Image (cartoon, rainbow, N blue to C red):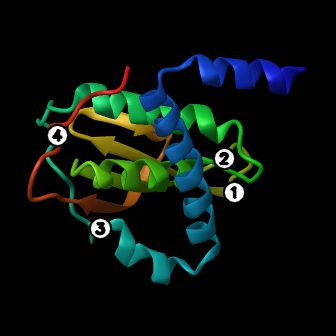
Amino acid sequence: MKFLKRLFVFFSFRPRLQLLFIEAFVLLGWARILKAKPFLEVAPKLGMKMEETSISNRSNREVIVNIASAVNAMSRHTFWESMCLVKAIAAMKMLERRQIESTLYLGTAKDENGKLIAHAWLRSGPYFLTGSEEMKKFTVVAMFAKKMSSRYEGEAYE
């Protein structure tokens, strides 16, 4: 019954939003496969190491917010683990497809037992798409900038 309710909600969205959610689901799967590979093989695909994109660019806000919403919502409905790094990589790829720059951050910290933990989050301009809830607890150890030569000025999703 819960599945049918979710399906009904999905089909109540406009077609463009449905496509955005499907894209997020597919890219979360792709990102999960990437996460299973050795990081040295994946890192070059993430962008320019130890560089950041501009924080002042406020264009494409609506597209960025919609991508963030789609990735975060669909990550709760995958059959695989879709935690911080998977969400950040999927959102980065969605932005890249729209020629929107982003920076993926990797951070580490110690938990209450002193065990080393890691976290990933994604920023585009001044907006954080994924992982912002916990990012302040972590020290940045790596960042990857996906820089674009031209900006996407297409339609926003409702």
- The amino acid type, in three-letter code, at marker 4 is Ile
User: In terms of depth relative to the viewer, which is nearer, 28 or 8?
Assistant: 8
Crowd rating for badge 1 (residues with CA inside 10 Å; few <14, some 14–19, many 20+): few
Separation of marks 3 and 1 at Cα, in angstroms: 29 Å
Measure the alpha-carbon separation of dots 2 and 3. 29 Å
Between marks 4 and 2, how big is the CA–CA gap? 29 Å
Q: CA distance from mark 4 to mark 3?
A: 16 Å
Residue 55 bears which disc, if any? 4
Mark 4 or mark 3: name the one nearer the start of the chain.
3
Q: Which residue is mark 3?
A: 47
Q: Amino acid at mark 3?
A: Gly
The residue labelled by disc 2 is 111
- Residue 26: x %, y % from top left: 57, 53
Q: Amino acid at mark 2?
A: Asp
In the image, is residue 33 above or below residue 44? above
- Residue 3 occupies which quadrant of the picture? top right
For marks 3 and 1, the one nearer the N-term is 3
Of circles 4 and 2, the one toward us is 4
Residue type indicated by callout 1: Lys
- The quarter of the picture where the N terminus appears is top right
Q: Is residue 133 visible?
A: no
Nearest to N terminus: mark 4 or mark 2: 4
Q: Secondary structure at mark 3?
A: loop
Q: CA distance from mark 4 to mark 1?
A: 32 Å
CA–CA distance between discs 2 and 1?
5 Å
The residue drawn where x is 63% and y is 41% is 75
Where residue 48 appears, x then y in whole percent? 25, 69
Of the pair 21 and 12, the residue shown nearer to us: 12
